[in-house]
Image: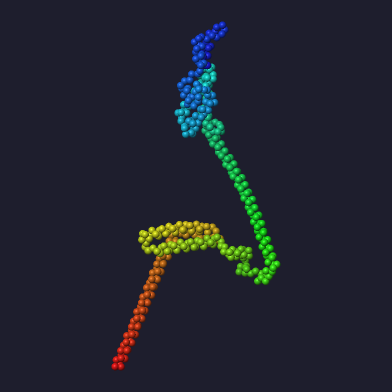
């Protein structure tokens, strides 16, 4: 009941000790008690908060508060959502206050409108109190935000520590399984080795019993395997001899040999390519030479990586190699090509000189024969003249 209804009741006439209401007052009470009259603005407030209208049903204060919080998270300027709308949120806040005031008037009809409005203002919570930080922190929103950030950092650190602890436990379990497997394999290998040793020992004893080790050359004499180097360790010498006999070579020797073979092939390719071209080169030959140099540059890059690997495994510092340069190799190839041309030119000159000498000798020989024939012909003619 509203304040006007109470005033009319208290001002009614009394008859025979009882309160009597006029007929007009009774009709007014029936009209006011038949149901609350909802204005258009109040209907818009309920619709804005997405609540049921008073005609359709009643919404509890908890439902009104929950609807306001849901709308504040969507449209509040500080919520950080994509649907932020400051003007719409102002309307939502006004609608929330109006709905609370209406529900408060429905629950309590006594008191003045000013007292009800003050009560509504005191009860209506500020929208900033409902920004969610998972219930962490206190104070102003900025203070709560800093406390929430620190809380998230601490929680992340704890999660990282838990994850690392689980990883260490998993690794330790895996390592334990690997150690156990290695122990089993090692024990199996030891058993096999012991069985082979027993078999070899049995064969040696059987051969000795048959006398196969009698009459051996050098029996009872010292072994003279280390006369060339008396300071060498016998065990090391035997191991090296076994490795050499079986064709084993250290990795650094194999790598060094591969490097020498590769650089020899690269230099031969450069030399042959430059020797086939003229000096000076025409544009077509120059393009061919540049293409060949590009291919050689890629090969030298791979070879320099091999040189780096060799320097890491070389036993002595003085045996290490430096990188091969494309410019130096090109200069070497050009110089070699020039020397080859000069050698070929000198060879052609020598061949021409030999041919010239051979022709001169042939000519002299022909002249000599011709002279002899002419002398013989003259002598015969003289003798014939004399006989006549």
* Residue 35 spot, x, y in % from top left: 51, 18
Above or below 363: residue 383: below
The residue at the far right in this view is 209
Whether residue 258 is visible to the viewer of this picture, yes or no, is yes
Figure label count: 0
Depth check, front residue: 246 or 326: 246
Residue at 64% x, 56% y: name it: 189
Depth check, front residue: 333 or 176: 176
The residue at the far bottom in this view is 387
* Residue 218 spot, x, y in % from top left: 66, 71
Compared across the picture, whether 18 is left or right of 286 comes to right
Whether residue 93 is visible to the viewer of this picture, yes or no, is no
The image quarter in which residue 343 lies: bottom left
Q: Colour scheme used in the picture?
A: rainbow
Residue at 62% x, 66% y: name it: 231
* Residue 298 spot, x, y in % from top left: 45, 57
The image quadrant where one finds the C terminus is bottom left
Residue at 50% x, 25% y: name it: 51
Residue at 30% x, 89% y: name it: 381
Compared across the picture, whether 47 is left or right of 349 comes to right
Compared across the picture, whether 201 is left or right of 360 comes to right
Above or below 372: residue 340: above
Depth check, front residue: 223 or 388: 388
């Amino acid at each position: 009941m509203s304040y006007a209804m109470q005033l009319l009741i208290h001002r009614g006439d009394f008859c025979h000790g009882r309160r009597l209401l006029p007929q007009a007052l009774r009709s007014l009470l029936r009209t006011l008690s038949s149901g609350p009259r909802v204005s258009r603005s109040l209907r818009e407030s309920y619709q804005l908060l997405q609540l049921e209208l008073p005609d359709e049903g009643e919404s509890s204060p908890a439902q009104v508060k929950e609807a306001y919080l849901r709308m504040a998270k969507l449209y509040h300027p500080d919520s950080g959502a994509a649907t932020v709308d400051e003007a719409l949120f102002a309307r939502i806040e006004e609608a929330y206050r109006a709905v609370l005031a209406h529900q408060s008037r429905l629950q309590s009809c006594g008191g003045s409108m000013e007292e009800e409005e003050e009560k509504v203002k005191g009860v209506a919570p500020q929208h900033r109190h409902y920004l969610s930080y998972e219930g962490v922190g206190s104070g102003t929103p900025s203070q709560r935000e800093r406390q929430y950030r620190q809380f998230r950092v601490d929680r992340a650190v704890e999660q990282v520590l838990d994850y690392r602890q689980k990883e260490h436990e998993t690794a330790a379990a895996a390592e334990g399984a690997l150690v156990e497997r290695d122990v089993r394999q090692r024990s199996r290998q030891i058993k096999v080795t012991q069985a082979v040793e027993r078999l070899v020992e049995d064969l040696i004893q059987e051969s000795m019993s048959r006398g196969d080790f009698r009459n051996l050359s050098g029996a009872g004499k010292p072994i003279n395997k280390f006369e060339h180097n008396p300071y060498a360790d016998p065990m090391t010498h035997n191991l090296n001899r076994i490795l050499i006999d079986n064709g084993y070579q250290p990795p650094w020797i194999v790598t060094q040999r591969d490097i020498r073979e590769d650089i020899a092939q690269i230099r031969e390719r450069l030399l042959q390519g430059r020797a086939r071209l003229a000096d000076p080169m025409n544009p077509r030959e120059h393009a061919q030479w540049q293409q060949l140099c590009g291919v050689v540059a890629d090969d030298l890059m791979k070879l320099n990586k091999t040189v780096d690997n060799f320097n890491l495994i070389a036993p002595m510092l003085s045996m290490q190699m430096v990188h091969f340069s494309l410019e130096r190799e090109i200069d070497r190839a050009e110089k070699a090509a020039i020397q080859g041309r000069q050698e070929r030119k000198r060879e052609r000159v020598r061949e021409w000189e030999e041919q010239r000498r051979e022709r001169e000798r042939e000519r002299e020989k022909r002249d000599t024969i011709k002279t002899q024939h002419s002398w013989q012909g003259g002598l015969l003619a003289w003798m014939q003249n004399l006989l006549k």
